[in-house]
Image (cartoon, rainbow, N blue to C red):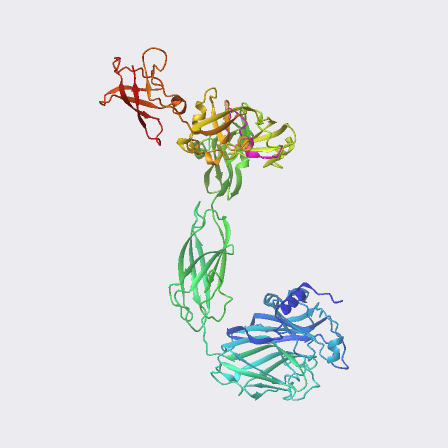
Amino acid sequence: MIALCKSQLLLLLLITISMSMFSQNISLHRQYEGKYDFTAIGNTLNFDENGSTGTCNVMLQSSANLNISSNQTIEAAYLYWAGSGNGDFNVKINNSNITAQRFFYTNTLTSNGLDFFGAFADITSLVKSTGSGIYTFSDIALGVNLSSYCDFGVNFAGWSILVVYEDVNLPNRQISIFDGFRTVNQASKKLSFNVSGFNAKNVATSKIGFLVWDGDSNLAVGESLKINGNSMSSNLNPINNVFNGTNSYSGSTNLYNMDLDLYYLTNEIQNGDTTANIELETNQDGVIVHNIVLSVESEKELPDAEFGSLQISNNELCDNRNIEIDIEILNSSNYGVIPSGTPVAIFLNNSYFDIFYTTQNLNAGESYIENLVLNIPDFFQTNFSITFNVDKNQNGDSFVEEVHEENNIISSNIMLIDIISEFTSLKVCVENGLDTTVNLNNAILNIDGGIVDGFYNTYNDASNSINDIQNVNSYSLNNSETIFVKIVNSQCSEIFSFDIIVSEKPSISRLDDIIFCDNYLDFNTIPVSSFLSLTSNQNLNNYFVDFYETLEDSQYNTNNLQEYFFEDFEQKLYIKLTNKNNLDCASIYPVNFIFSDIEILGSLIYEQCSSLGTYVDLAKVNDIKDFGLHGGYDFYHTIENAALSIDPILDISNYNLEEGNYLYVKYFENTFECPFFYIVDIQLNSCEFFIPEGFSPNNDQINDYFQILQLEDFYPNFKIKIFSRYGVLVYKGDKNDKLWDGRSLNGKLLPASTYYYIIDLGEENLKPIKGWVYLNK
């Protein structure tokens, strides 16, 4: 079983996701423009050249020597390593841990698709600090059984450090670093690709370097390297065996199965060229190209933006956050122009703060001083770093092509003579208006740049440092107050304030039992919202109200009840009242919940004349004799709805009997007691009444009055008028008036005759009834 480290698993994941990437094309990785050159060191980890007689294993470490002269300054250093198998991407250089930043892979070197890996890491800081000396590469684990690789003679591992350095004595050059992971072998025979992006000036000083893996000294069948069609060779690299395990930088010929080759260009590249074709060919040996470095004198004469002097003032003024800055911006190159409008980003403690733009064109060797005033926000600390980055915006983007991109920063530390403080309000809880105590120091969240001079009750006292509060740790009060704090340092003083908010501990003057007034609930789960009608004279608007099953839950705010399943007719729970202005200010009370059965007091039939239609004014039920409702009342279709106050009939003045005529009325005599229920059966009646055609008012006790039977019963709001045959009104009345006895309005007996009546039934939708009656003597 082969154990893989995390980085190996990451590479395998990348390979699995994109199996079409059998190798990586050679492309431009980085370019340097200026007085630069390059060199390379490295070594193989093979004991000897692979093949049928070679050692089927690799060394644990190997070393190489780097020589950098005193007039050369290291600009960049890149570590490349590669080998057979899935790879190891956590290695060491001089016992310093190195983790790969880029990964390479191919399975096209052999016909059976064996895996090979490559890796890259930027180790510039390590090489700059180490400088010249021995570099030892170690701790690589290839992660495979090498026997299958040894059988094909392709077991290898090695490493190389590519170093770009600056030398002021050199001409202006362009160093172009290309890398990838391309293979050529007996099957593919030829590999051809272009490198571009350079601009050749003086080809006499141009050179090109290669890092190539798995070359063999004893395989020279049809092998060649061509640049722009020109075959390449050197003292160490014969024209027919260019990749033969040699190191052009050190002169070594035992760099088994890796090549660090360097070729000086003469006719291969012409002045003005910006691209070159590279062609590798072999009929037997298989190799992997990892990097190519091209150095040409360049026509590009670039500027170099950097900073000169940096002067900061006003930062030592008391309580001042407007600092003045004079910063010198210069073009330190002998070429080019830094244009007006080049961005300069400003960072405070490495976080982006602001940006400004240069106001002058800077030719070679020119500079100017930018005058700035920066306002440092009040919330920012008094001790911080400030960094300026020329030719960079807040995202790190560059806009001017320069000789150096790494010298664009200048930094300084700033100390403001300022006092920064942060306070919080103190919230205390009092009971029944009694005094309480509080530690005033608890209001201090942060003080930067000073110390507490004292706590005071007034701003004037704080200004004059008089009457400071003595009992700071146990300050007594019973009302809300504002406290003033004076903070001082060697040069400044400042007064701050905070509030002490006094909240009254919640209390309930009367706590009633909560009564559920019906058994239709059948001990179901009751929502807590039904609990809140629990007190007769306590305003709970200023409190958060919560219910708990146990006293312990209420004390620790656990298992807050949203609903509760009652199993008994009487149950005790706990109510917690918390002041909304102070969550630490709360009171807990026990409360009893009691269930009461529904009581139906009676039933009644209510009749309405069918001539009035099917709409009924339910309010008239309250007018039924012996059925007076003196409190509030509602109507419901079912006793269950009435018990739970669900879906009451909303429009009782215009109720349609087609929705049901058997209703329940629920009314309350007292808000804090259970309601009463009545059953009402509303029935439609034909409401027919008899109008006599005559009467004889002769005092014989028979038909002495014009009486319409059941008129008052069916239409209690009726009105009647009677006229003579000549249209004279002789009688008018309603249910409250005496029946007509044959007399006129002035009390005189009328003669026998036919008289005419108009009866208004008192209903808007019913027409008056007109007719005649004969008065007989």
Q: 675 or 280: nearer the eye?
A: 675
Front-most of 403 and 578? Answer: 578
Left or right of 678, for residue 288: right
Q: Is 407 located above or below residue 679 in the figure?
A: below
Residue 458 inside the magenta-drawn segment: no
Q: Residue 754: x, y in percent? A: 27, 21
Which of 749 and 229 lies nearest the eye of the viewer? 749
Question: Residue at image x 71%, y 67%?
Answer: 139
Identify the image quadrant of residue 612: top left
How many numbered markers are drawn? 0
Whether residue 468 appears in this view of the structure is no
Q: Is residue 617 visible to the viewer in this orientation of the structure? A: yes
| Above or below, 239 relative to 211 | below
- Specify whether 568 is left or right of 735: right
In reply to whether residue 533 is colored magenta, the answer given is yes
Q: Give how far across and how far down residue 541 sits, in percent.
A: 49, 31
**Quadrant location of the C terminus in the rendered image:** top left
Q: Which span is picked out in magenta?
A: 523-541
Residue shown at the point (52%, 80%) measured from the top left = 296
> For this view, does 90 lie left or right of residue 643?
right
Residue 469's spot in the image, x, y percent? 51, 30
Q: Position of residue 563 (x, y in %)?
A: 59, 36
Q: Main secondary structure of the magenta part?
A: loop
Identified at 44% across, 61% down, the residue is: 344
Location of the N terminus by quadrant is bottom right
Classify residue 214 as left or right of residue 332.
right
Q: Nearer the viewer, residue 330 or 432?
A: 432
